[in-house]
Image (spheres, coloured by chain):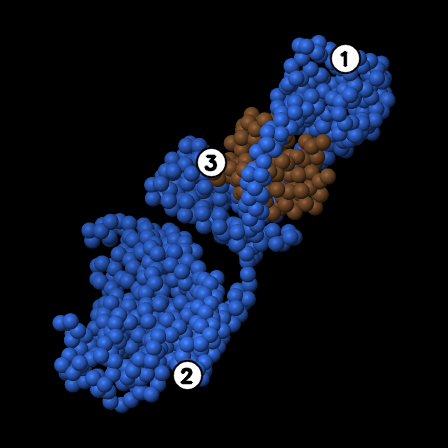
Amino acid sequence: MDMNEIKEIFFQECEEQLAELESGLLRLNDGDRDPETVNAVFRAVHSIKGGAGAFGLDDLVSFAHVFETTLDCVRSNKLEPTQEVLKVMLKSADVLADLTNVARDGGSVDQARSAQLIRELEALAKGEAPPAAATAEAPAPRAAAAPKAAPAPKPAAVAAVAAPNDQGFVPVAFSFDDFGGEEEAVIEHPAYEVVFKPKSELYTKGNEAALLLRDLSRLGEMSIHCNMDSLPPLDQMDPEAAYFSWKVSIKTDKGEDAVRSVFEFAEWDCELDVLAVETGEGAEAIGGDLPMQPVPFDLSALDEEPHAPLGVVEEEEQIAAAQEAVAAAQTASNVVQMAGSASRAAAADKGAAAAAAAAQNNAQQASSAAAPTIRVDLDRVDRLINLVGELVINQAMLSQSVIENDSNGVSSINMGLEELQQLTREIQDSVMAIRAQPVKPVFQRMARTVREIADITGKSVRLVTEGENTEVDKTVIDKLAEPLTHMIRNAVDHGLEMPEKRLAAGKSAEGTVKLTAKHRSGRIVIELSDDGAGINREKVRQKAIDNDLIAADANLSDEEIDNLIFHAGFSTADKVSDLSGRGVGMDVVKRSIQALGGRINISSKPGQGSVFTMSLPLTLAVLDGMVVTVAGQTLVVPLTAIVETLQPDAAAIHSFGATQRLISIRNSFCPLVDVGRILNFRATQANPVEGVALLVESEGGGQRALMVDAIQGQRQVVIKSLEANYTHVPGIAAATILGDGRVALILDVDAVVSASRGQPLHLETSLAAAG
Amino acid sequence: MKKKVLTVDDSRTIRNMLLVTLNNAGFETIQAEDGIEGLEVLEDANPDVIVTDINMPRLDGFGFIEGVRKNEKYRAIPILVLTTESDAEKKNRARQAGATGWIVKPFDPTKLIDAIERVTA
């Protein structure tokens, strides 16, 4: 693994942490006061900061740091996570996400926004009300950024780098060096006298005096003097007490800080004196007491067992003293080791059971050490999915030819084939599951969009999401974000009213935008609703007339008027706002949904809001279908759409108007739709009594009886996109390849149902293009 | 014999960096994702030194260090804490829990190895 790979993992982890952060903040926003939620939020930011620091991503680190500090206030109950506070934090989470993206992909972040948020976060941490955004235009950002940007000036040069003041006075730089001052005394090898007296706590924290002395010895030449004056007689000795102290003289060019930093880990648990001593005469002064002869510090002694008898060492024998130091330092650890070996012996007695448990633990350990996910190039998965699709088709072909050639029926080949079929299916399911992902990430991104638009428009909005765990193919998810963002933007900008207006209309000041996802009829249905004012039909109608989209006297249903907003260049906004002025209209949304093989519908109630319903295929998914024959053609009807099949009885068929027919099913009437007729396979309607009716339920919930000539059977088919390989065909969702190698079309049940409402399919193409 | 290091950190990024750094420096590395797992693997891992993060789910660094010190066998094992720069108070708490020393983030391989060498024989 190299740094780039780790960096990639870091960004992956950031994404997870950011999601965790946002969902945690939203939970807090909903009144969750579980300390673990606050902790998780804190950890998310902390973790990002930690990783970012490792990669030198300074912008990310400094923002995360401020954010973390404020979160720490919440964590320690110094700051109440009110809605106001959380608003700032959610926005900060957005900026953190931006900074992460910039760190990964380059680009730039909105500096003013992040500077403003840093100020708001800092104010919160100090227990002040967050500074209003209006003051953001004040010169504060510069001031806030300056200390970070400018490297700390050297003390002597402070005057030189000072900024020009208001009078335009520019201080002149001059160096004190010119006066010959401030020059450091050139001392080649200063000497230090270190008195080091450990307390017993030093040893209980896993530090060892010997190791510290060893570390010190690496700084330069040194001599060690061990003081054992406080060593009691053996019978009074507490094995865990610290009796020794050391006096070390060392010559080093590394400086006093280096000497002190050796004891960094020990400073709290020892008495430490570091004295710089003058070389020359001073050194001799020490020398009288402690000869400055280099004493080799025996590192190998660290691995030896102590052997020298205690208390008989002559003070002059410094080597022995050094060894004693080691021995003394090891006393504590020896005690621990003895205890350790005792427990090891006890453990050994437990025998095989313990060994087995250990082995199991090792296995667990190994599995937990491995990453829980792997990253796979999407291309590879695509290739796998395609291959599995081919496998399914091949298996179907094989089955068919075996059945045709094997008139005896049961044979081992047949049994083998059945197993193959089952295996193929399982492989297919597993492969499809690789790419299926919950829509959650996209929904989470929408939460951010809502916040931003609400901020810009000054509206108060709550986003409610449902069914975020609904899974759909990754290719769909990726393409969903853009149209969804635009629709959300529209819903907040155009759909919801300003708070005052809402209150006047008897609604809550806070508007609600709801985003739901669910599976239905083998498709994913995503619904976006708002409780705003609904579509102003008069205005839409007038605009359509003005733009020559419809005739002034056109008689349109409410639904038709609503759907006019999908026309190119259609905007109900009076003026082009920041939001709507992006050149993207609902027509683009509709086109991108269609490009995915999906449909979009709107229904609106004046004063109550609008609902956009998108129905999307689970692309490249496999479909359980009913293979039927219509006018000599083989079609596949998605099984999920079919409620039941029935053989119409002449008595159950009723005529309605000139061309419509109804079928009565259990005392209710259901429109009868001839699939052959509606797809223009034949000119006249077939006789219902000669065919089979498939009772289907469309997305809108309405039932229709689809007339087909015959049912061939149920089969699992691999969806091959018609758009990608040919073009969009109204009424047809996709195509598939049957066992005999023929191409069969997959019926788009919803399109057929809506076509049966009196909009012939060939007309829908033009409507779709226009709308 | 290679010295064995147990690292405890919930961040995958930091775990990976520790792994690479320690392995490159010739250590054997065992990893755990939080304090609970750290205590679980401790017995089998029997490490020479432990490097632990503070902020972790389930059981944080303080709790983990206390847990290690409670174990007779690991009473004197060196434990290094990965801390962030501004946490003097936390450093102190970690010390009181029984930490041997600390490695200041941002993560610097040289500092890490230095610190480990400083506390291991």
A228 or A716: nearer the viewer: A716
Residue annotated with mark 2: A407
**Identity, as a three-letter code, of the amino acid under mark 3:** Asp
Q: Position of residue A720 (x, y in %)?
A: 44, 75
Under circle 3, the secondary element is: helix
Which label sits in the foreground, 3 or 1? 1
Q: Is residue A755 left or right of residue A105?
A: left
Residue annotated with mark 1: A311
- Badge 1 crowding class, 10 Å Cα cut-off, few under 14, some 14 to 19, many 20 or more, is few
Colour seen for chain B: brown
A285 or A584: nearer the viewer: A285
The circle drawn on residue A72 is: 3
Image quadrant in which you'd find residue A188: top right
Letter of the chain that mark 3 sits on in the rendering: A
**Identity, as a three-letter code, of the amino acid under mark 2:** Ser
Q: Earlier in the sequence, mark 3 or mark 1?
A: 3
Under circle 1, the secondary element is: loop
Residue at image location 67% in from the left, 42% down from the top: B28
A697 or A455: nearer the viewer: A697
